[in-house]
Image (cartoon, rainbow, N blue to C red):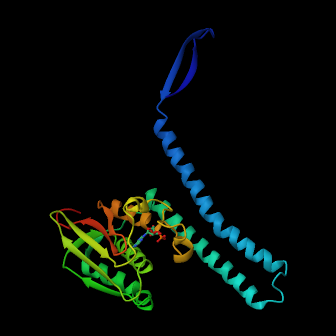
Amino acid sequence: IAWNNTVLRDITGAIAGIMSIGEDITQRQAVERMKNEFISLVSHELRTPLTSMRGSLGLLKMGVYDNQPDKAKRMLDIAVTDCDRLGRLVNDILSLERLDSGQVTLVKEVCDVADLIKHSVEAIDAIAEAAGIAIQVTPLSAQVYVAPDTIIQTLTNLLSNAIKFSESNTTITVGVQHQSDCILFHVTDQGRGIPTEHLERIFGRFQQVDVSDSRQKGGTGLGLAICRSIIQQHGGGIWAESTLGSGSTFYFTLPVYKESVQ
Ligand code: ADP
């Protein structure tokens, strides 16, 4: 507790008493600490591509590759990749901050689950095809009361991860099930799987199973944190199950739409 003391004086100026106001600062300190941790994580994540880009451009500027156009081009490619990564990081960081600070008002409407899945699969189909991965949909007619763009963003994120961490000639299945009071979505892949000790951790910010995942797979480590924030704001839950080496399933729930509940 932080004490704020004020000396009280009477009209003659003599000390009449001391007023002490105690403020419980533990919660404020915790919020402050989380903010500082986030800022140091963000700075670290932004600095990595920036340092790499500065390195490549610096070498080019010094003329190190003036007589080696192939190497010069490679350096430029690295700089462009770093630039793209910085762009993705900034977008994801802003998206997450806006979601978590309540700046995003979810404009909800009644949506058909099959439509949400259809739009998400369409958005990612070309990437799946290029990777030689089939997406199978097992739809169900159900309605949910959601902000459609954010649920499509969640599904697209999960599908994009499923593609990134699967080999060609495998199948991803997407579907829904009616539970007693919610709709349960699932995205199942036949990919590399996730070690049990990482299943919960990967929903945290900048958390990846393998340190090489961000460079090799181009991710930011923020996708699942964004998904969790979106689903929690809809009153649902999101989690993963996996068997190492044979695949993973990501589940999320959304409350069933009932006409009386809006
Ligand atoms: P990223 O941008 O790295 O994909 P995410 O937050 O979406 O960030 O995912 C965090 C990490 O979780 C990934 O880097 C990867 O290590 C792991 N992961 C996510 N989805 C899968 C999946 N379907 N199969 C295997 N690993 C996954």
Looking at the rendering, in which quadrant would you find the C terminus?
bottom left
Residue drawn where x is 49% and y is 35% of the image: 25
Q: Image check: 32 left or right of 147?
A: right
Dividing the picture into quarters, in which one does residue 166 lie? bottom left
Is 23 rendered above or below residue 88?
Answer: above
Residue drawn where x is 65% and y is 64% of the image: 47
> Residue 63 in the image: x percent, y percent?
84, 81
Is 242 rendered above or below residue 44?
Answer: below
Q: Image check: 208 left or right of 158?
A: right
Which residue reaches farthest left? 180
Q: Quadrant of ligand 1?
A: bottom left
Count of numbered circles in the view: 0
* Residue in the foreground of this view, choosing between 27 and 185: 185
Residue drawn where x is 79% and y is 80% of the image: 60
Dividing the picture into quarters, in which one does residue 59 lie? bottom right
Dividing the picture into quarters, in which one does residue 17 lie? top right
> Residue 114 in the image: x percent, y percent?
25, 81
Q: Image check: 180 left or right of 57?
A: left
Is 27 rendered above or below residue 237?
Answer: above
Residue drawn where x is 73% and y is 71% of the image: 54
* Residue in the foreground of this view, choosing between 19 and 55: 55
Is 3 rendered above or below residue 75?
Answer: above
Which residue reaches farthest front? 245
